[in-house]
Structures are given as structure tokens and as C-alpha cells.
Amino acid sequence: MTVNELVCDLKKIIPLSQAEDYDNVGLLCGNPDREVSGILVCHDALEIVVDEAIAKNINFIVAFHPIIFSGLKSVTGKNYVEKAVLKALENKIAIYAIHTAFDNDYFGVNYRICEELGLKNQKVLMPKKQGLHQLNVFVPQDFSEKIKNALFGAGAGNIGFYDECSFAVSGSGTFRPIEGADPFSGKIGIRENADEVMISVIYESYKKNQIINAMKSAHPYEEVAYQIIQLENENQFLGLGRFGEFEEAMDEEQFLTFVKDKFNLKAIRHSDFINKKIKRVGVLGGSGASGIGAAISQKCDAYLTGDLKYHDYFQGDGKMLTCDIGHFESEQFVTEHLVDILSQKFTIFAVSKSTEKTNPVNYFL
């Protein structure tokens, strides 16, 4: 398998189109035509991780955080980013970053956090907006199943845990071929009445090109009549953060002790106690101050994230216990989770978990 073939498969497992616009995901460096010897999964593709890949004879690194986030004007090894990239290039090692594509994935970072906590009835905390389109296409009745199959094969009609979802309405359409046309039916200059079906499907916006191409390839008409409508519906299966509930509520000190033990934490920074039981919990791995409002609106009793600033702790306003468990600490299950996913998919070479410590934050106790 080449680097390019591996990248194509990775995009199918966790689509990069799920990532936030500001992010830098995908293949960051490496020759797409080189054959892959193995995969090393890490949190941060630092120089020590590249050294680990060299020692293990692995030439493809899947990193959670992108080592190249903003533009590089040179690669001379003058800082930690350039050192890692330079060593990777010199040793013919590719680096691939997944970051917010995995943050937004339904079974990604925040799913794993909730699973570790044992939360039930899980839902996405901040569903993606303006990410769904509706396609209406008009087809001859005899071709309706062929068009449906083409649309479904291209990824249309997937709604949560259901696929091949569509709606069809029969009716009568008219058209008149003019000079230069090569009509499927009818004659030049004569208006034609045709029994047609309007097939309606919903799809994620990033699938648009592949779905339209599949539809046109299967359609018998020279000019395909179709409409694309952007929906206001939120995608309930894609977005940042997650929330769920404990089977049994805990008091606040019991909850913090439980989290500290589960995440192997030295300390937890938190807002004032709210003097109520903790049952519904929101989570957002990494820097999650942006999810505080959503957690409150979902009536969460507590919210776990990282990188909170001083004033963020006021936002709970006595309604919710807000907890900063650390950026790395909140994402610590990412590499293990990715290894589990990739090991099931790729069996022709080894998928290894990095053993190097890349958390830059240390504690003096």
C-alpha cells in the first residue's frame, strides 16, 4: 500500500471534511507514492516521535495534533516544529494529522471520553450547522431505482444509523427539445409530457460532488433536472463535544474523585460547588471553553474540558460545575482509540501506539 492509498482509506474512515475550517489536517509531509512500512499513532508528532518511528522502521505517522498548524517559511530546524518536519523528510517518513476531524466524529474523541466515564444516552453537544443538503432530482419512472442505487452508492440518504433513505413523488413533467438537442424521448420542436418521479435525498455537504457525478452518470436525460437545497437542520451525528448521564447521580466531591481516578489526574481545577447531584455531564476534549454555553443549555450538571481561563469559571453561574482537567489529559485516550480503529482496518502492516511522552505540561507537587 502506498502513502496515497493509505491516505484515501483514512479519509473514508474519518473524513477530513468533518474538521473545523481553521484546522490543518491530512497529509502534512511525505511522498504519496512511497510504500508504507507501518503506522505509528501519536498525540503530537514531535522529533522524539519521529526518532521512535525510525527505530521501529515505520514510515507513516498518524498524529492527532497537526505539527504544522500555521505556514512554514523555512524548514531549517530552528524550532520544535521544523526539527520534527526536517527529520521526517530526511528519513522519508510521512506525517498525517487528524485533529478536529476526529473531534467532530460521532465515534471520535468525545465518544471515547463518555465511554470511559460510563455515560449513557449520549448525544452530540454542539451539532454541526449548515452541513446538510437536500437533493431533488426528476427521473423517468422506469429509471427511478437505478438513480436511487447510484445516489445511495455515492453516500446520499445516510441519516444517523440509517442509510438508503429517500422520498419519491410521482407526477407529470413537460419539456420541448429545441434545435441542437439529443433528447432521450420526444421530437425536436414538440412539447413532450413525461411521467416522472421526483426523488429526494439528504446528504452531508462534503459529499456533493461525488453524489452529483453519480446521479448524472446514471441518469438517461441529456439535461438532468435537479435542485439542491441547503437545510437549516443540524446534523445530530456530527459536531464538537458530547453529553450523557450516569445511571446513578453523585455528589460533587464524589464526582471529582471519580474523574480524578478515571483520568489519572494530579489535580482538577473547577468552579464553585453548585450544591446539587451530578448526573448529566458534558465533555469536550482539548480547549473547550466554547462549549460551556451549550452544556448549560443542555442542562448539564458538570462539564469536563481543558484550557479554561479565569473568567470561564464564572459562566456556570451556579447552574453547572465547570472543570478543567487539562488539555492533554482530556484527550489522553485518543491514540489508543485510533489504534483500535486502524488495527481493525489495516491488517497488512503493524499499527503501533507511540510510547513517547509529548504532553508539554508538567506539575510540581
Image (cartoon, rainbow, N blue to C red):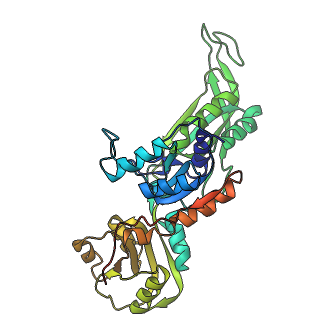
- Residue 69 visible in the displayed image: no
Assign the N terminus to one quadrant of the image: top right
Q: Position of residue 266 (x, y in %)?
A: 38, 82
Left or right of residue 250: residue 12: right
Residue at the outermost left position: 311
Give the mark count: 0
Up-down relation of residue 356 to residue 9 (above or below):
below
Up-down relation of residue 204 to residue 249 (above or below):
above
Q: Nearer the viewer, residue 284 or 238?
A: 284
Up-down relation of residue 231 to residue 121 (above or below):
above
Left or right of residue 344: residue 28: left
Quadrant in which residue 116 is drawn: bottom right
Q: Position of residue 347 (x, y in %)?
A: 71, 54
Quadrant in which residue 8 is drawn: top right
Q: Position of residue 278 (x, y in %)?
A: 43, 86
- Residue 286 visible in the displayed image: yes
- Residue at 60%, 10% in the rendered image: 178
Q: Nearer the viewer, residue 359 or 272?
A: 359
Up-down relation of residue 116 to residue 41 (above or below):
below
Q: Nearer the viewer, residue 44 or 291?
A: 44
- Residue at 74%, 35% in the rendered image: 146
Quadrant in which residue 172 is drawn: top right
Q: Position of residue 118 (x, y in %)?
A: 56, 79
Residue at the outermost right position: 142
Assign the C terminus to one quadrant of the image: bottom left
- Residue at 61%, 35% in the rendered image: 137
Residue at the outermost front position: 55
Q: Nearer the viewer, residue 341 or 101?
A: 341
